[in-house]
Amino acid sequence: MGIKNFGFDSVETYLQRGIYFIPDYQREYAWTKDDQVFDFWMDLEGCVIEGRSNHFFGQVVIHDSQDENKKYVIDGQQRTSTSVIFLAVLRDLFYEVYTSSNIAAAQHKFEDIRLKYIGRWSEEENELRLTLGNIDQSYFTKNIQIGKPKIDIEPEEASHKRIKEAYLYFENKLREKLGSLTDGREQYELLLKYYNMFLTNFRLMYVETDELNEAFIIFETLNARGKDLETSDLLKNHLFRTSGRSIERIKTVWSNTVENLESIDITKFLRHFWNAKNKFAREKDLFKNIRNKISTPKQCEEFMSDFYDMSEVYKTLVSPSDEAFTTDTGLIRILKNLKIIKASSFYPIILALASNKFSEETNEGFRDEDITKVALSIESLLVRNCVVAGRVANKYEVLFADIAYAISEKQIITVEEICARIKEETLNDEEFGSSFKTLSIKSVTVAKYLLREINNIVDPEVQVIEDNYKIHLEHIMPKSIGTWNIEDEVQKKYLNRIGNLTLLGNEYNRSLQNKLFDQKKQTYERSNLNITKTLIRYGTWDIEAIEKRQDALSKIALLRWK
């Protein structure tokens, strides 16, 4: 049949028009108190102050499923959920006014919100007017629809935290308004202003269709150029619209992928995944490119199968300490190093390699040790070019995507070819050594990483532990000059030079920080780390000593980041 209903409704009419369900494949609650929830409140506050007669609140697209006799929110689930959260706050505050001032009208509003807009719930009967997806529903029911969030209990799920924060944000804002009023009638009248403005004057564009495919087309048409909508949401609806009879399978795989990624930004994953297998696309062009390429149910199934498989690999790239798609400890270690220097532009290459795993039948593809060799080349490029020479890491995003595409298209089939492409863009030894000799590092974690790797090259028998909580960064010339005989300008210039930094383990003592060099050397001598123990060879610690040590470290760095 197609579109059943279309028009502009007040929030009041919309919420009473039907009982709504958020599909399980939709995003969990995503609005944050500092962004969309803040905007919601500012719009409402502005309308109340200015006495506006109407405010456009956005759009909702509803699929009226005849088979299930349910109305599903295809677009507008965030504003619908937030509307219920805000009304729950008004419900609770109206009830407080009633119990403290015995104003019957406040009790009536409490009952109206509970019955008309939120709904009743008991163990025997569920009359709630909004049901969220699996991840959020239980928390939403208990803490919004039939109760309120407990201040002293911190939710585990990120979306539950956002729900709680939205409730508390609205509650705090309204309590600030009520705080200046002592009379119960005045408090009731103030709440009533916000109640009426929101329910009556906030208006939605409402579209309802009984055909799911039509709902997806409407969603895409309304949102394809929207600024606030995630590319992943547009893609999801395009896949559902295009998948035909495979829609239930596609919906299941999508939900499994989102669940598998946990808190990882699915749009970022989507972009890295796409750039691993296709010509480079920036985020603004991503949806258009995907839509043009995926246009049949079979293509949808193939895309989602690979999308899910690669989500396992992507989790390791984002959190190498927690996840692992490989048992190669060398690869995991390099990925941890790349995480330290905040590198992510290389992800498409690893995804492309992981998608082309070695096959015994064809004798083609890449083993884990191959991926490790490539990752090592990537690490050398990013350390040399970005960490040391200061070039912007995003500059290499296109390079890495081009290499990934070449791997996926089998234009490059050997590790040697891949590493050669990366080597072409890597600073040569002369440029790297020159930059390293004047290198200053303000990031504690990056400085620890560089010094740890240098020490491990010099003395492979005594490897520096990777736990940053058990290894300490020591400024030899201290942050606070104290009794050191050194000028302020010199101290500022050389404080964070890599030659002025070293590592300490169990021998670390906070009182050591500002002592003179001769006193510090007594501690350095007890260290098991070569780069620290060898400091006792220096008679004094001044500019000449820092530069001499940094020059020595640069020669070792050339060996580590080849």
Image (cartoon, grey):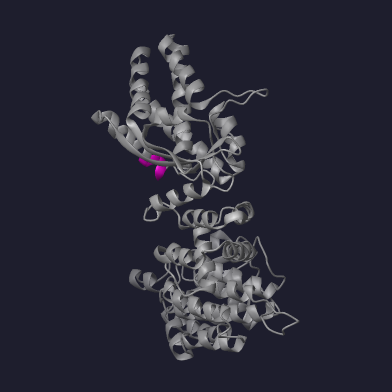
Q: Is residue 175 above or below residue 349?
A: above
**Residue 522 drawn in magenta:** no
Q: Is residue 248 above or below residue 210?
A: below
Q: Taking the image as drawn, is residue 254 in sight? A: no
Q: Is residue 504 above or below residue 186?
A: below
**What is the count of numbered marks?**
0
Q: What secondary structure characterizes most of the magenta part?
A: helix
Q: Which residues are magenta?
A: 34-39
The C terminus: image quadrant: bottom right
Q: Give the x, y percent position of residue 454.
A: 58, 79
Which residue is more in the foreground, 50 or 238?
238
Taking the spot 46% from the left edge, 27% from the top edge, the residue there is: 16
Q: Taking the image as drawn, is residue 478 in sight? A: yes
Q: Give the x, y percent position of residue 57.
A: 36, 38
Q: Quick one: which residue is furthest to the front in this view?
A: 1
Q: Give the x, y percent position of residue 5.
A: 42, 37
